[in-house]
Image (cartoon, helix red, strand yellow):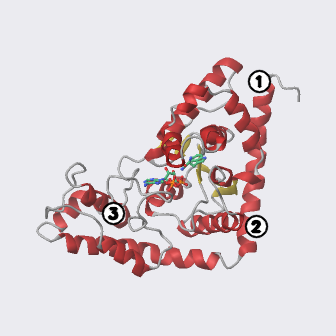
Amino acid sequence: MSKKRVLSGIQPTSDSFHLGNYLGAVKQWVELQEGHDAFYCIVDLHALTVETDPALLRKRTLMSAAQLLALGISPEKSTLFVQSQVPQHNQLGWIMECMTGFGEASRMTQFKDKSSKSGADAARVGLFTYPMLMAADILLYQSHLVPVGEDQRQHIELTRDIAGRFNTRYGQTFQIPEGFILKQGAKIYDIQDPTSKMSKSSGSGSGLIDILDAPEVNLKKFKSAVTDAGREVKFDTIEKPGISNLLTIHSALSGKSISDLEYEFDGKGYGDFKASVAEVVVEYFRPIRAHALELLEDEAHLLAILHQGSEKARSVAQATLESTYKNLGVVL
Ligand code: ATP
Ligand code: LTN
């Protein structure tokens, strides 16, 4: 039996990935490259939906590649590529836009959240059509599984709806994908504001844990992580959102279960627990950070890996684009 196809993407919108990106998505990417045919994409076209600085976009695309490799994505096992190097994404993206209702697109909560920050009039049209480009990313590869964080659930549902409608109207063209979203860890919260998602583009900064930050910086941030007025280390997302978030982070990186951690810290203060989370995080990312920084010194090597991945991605994507055009009646 042929291996199931996995596809996911990450935007090069910041110098470093944060803990939410890793625990919600990239950790699963690394695990799924075993036993699956994995395609992982740095979605630079998606990053253009907000104001971008050219030098920063270039740097962050390379930094994203270096981090993915350092976190364990292997170019032998996975196809790692850059979205803009595969023009079929734009080509199928247009078809996806033509298959999506305006009302349907208007219901996307990420657009509503992000556009409300700048005011709807200032938001770019690309921010509105972004989920249709994401649908193209996924459907081009006939993907079965899409490992993402909880915030992307609605976009995956939209992708499934568009694909199902297209198949019914124009004949079987696309695999209907499924989201691969963890039960625990699909949403990591800001450690200063544990009711908001940890995010590159919003939040306090001091509540954001970047995996490439120096150990001292992250140790300090964990020391001042927001908890609650109680003293028990217990998983309770309603009464103890801060502690629950820290338990989720600790458990995902140390491999200890939440109940073992509750037992281990029974009777100990929040200070001890926060110090332990800080240590687990810092030690986990210490070698990864060093490896990523080392990879960044050889730009030619990074570019060669990405070019090779993009070439493979183009050939898979072209086959889907052709069958889509054919089924639509486009003259080839
Ligand atoms: P922004 O917050 O600026 O929109 P982002 O941090 O969500 O950006 P993306 O590149 O859009 O970054 O996301 C990459 C992956 O990380 C996606 O699969 C997304 O669902 C996941 N992700 C992002 N933030 C979190 C979080 N706080 N918890 C779990 N997963 C997350
Ligand atoms: N929309 C996603 C990034 C993204 C993606 C994709 C994820 C773009 N294309 C395809 C999975 C599959 C985000 O904002 N995190």
Between the C-alphas of marks 3 and 2, the distance is 40 Å
Q: Specify whether residue 18 is in view.
A: yes
**Residue identifier under label 1:** 327
3 vs 1, front mark: 3
Q: Which of pointers 3 and 1 lies earlier in the amino acid sequence?
A: 3
Residue at image position (64%, 53%) is 43
Please state the horizontal and vertical placement of residue 84, each as a whole percent of the image.
74, 52
Q: Is residue 148 left or right of 229 when viewed as pictured?
A: right
Does the closest atom of ligand 2 sit within 8 Å of the Cβ of label 1? no
Q: Which of pointers 1 and 2 lies earlier in the amino acid sequence?
A: 2
- Judging depth in this view, the residue of 21 and 51 nearest the camera is 51
Q: Residue 304 — which label? A: 2
Mark 3 residue type: Gln
Residue at image position (76%, 49%) is 86
Quadrant of res 326: top right
Please state the horizontal and vertical placement of residue 96, each as a whole percent of the image.
68, 32
Mark 1 residue type: Asn
Q: Residue 11 — which label? A: none
Q: Residues within 10 Å of mark 2 (few under 14, many from 20)?
A: few
- Judging depth in this view, the residue of 249 and 210 nearest the camera is 210
**Residue identifier under label 3:** 192
Mark 2 residue type: Ala
Please state the horizontal and vertical placement of residue 147, each as a whole percent of the image.
51, 48
Q: Are the residues tagged 3 and 1 within 8 Å (C-beta)? A: no
Please state the horizontal and vertical placement of residue 32, each as a whole percent of the image.
52, 52
Q: Which of pointers 3 and 2 lies earlier in the amino acid sequence?
A: 3
Q: Specify whether residue 257 is in view.
A: no
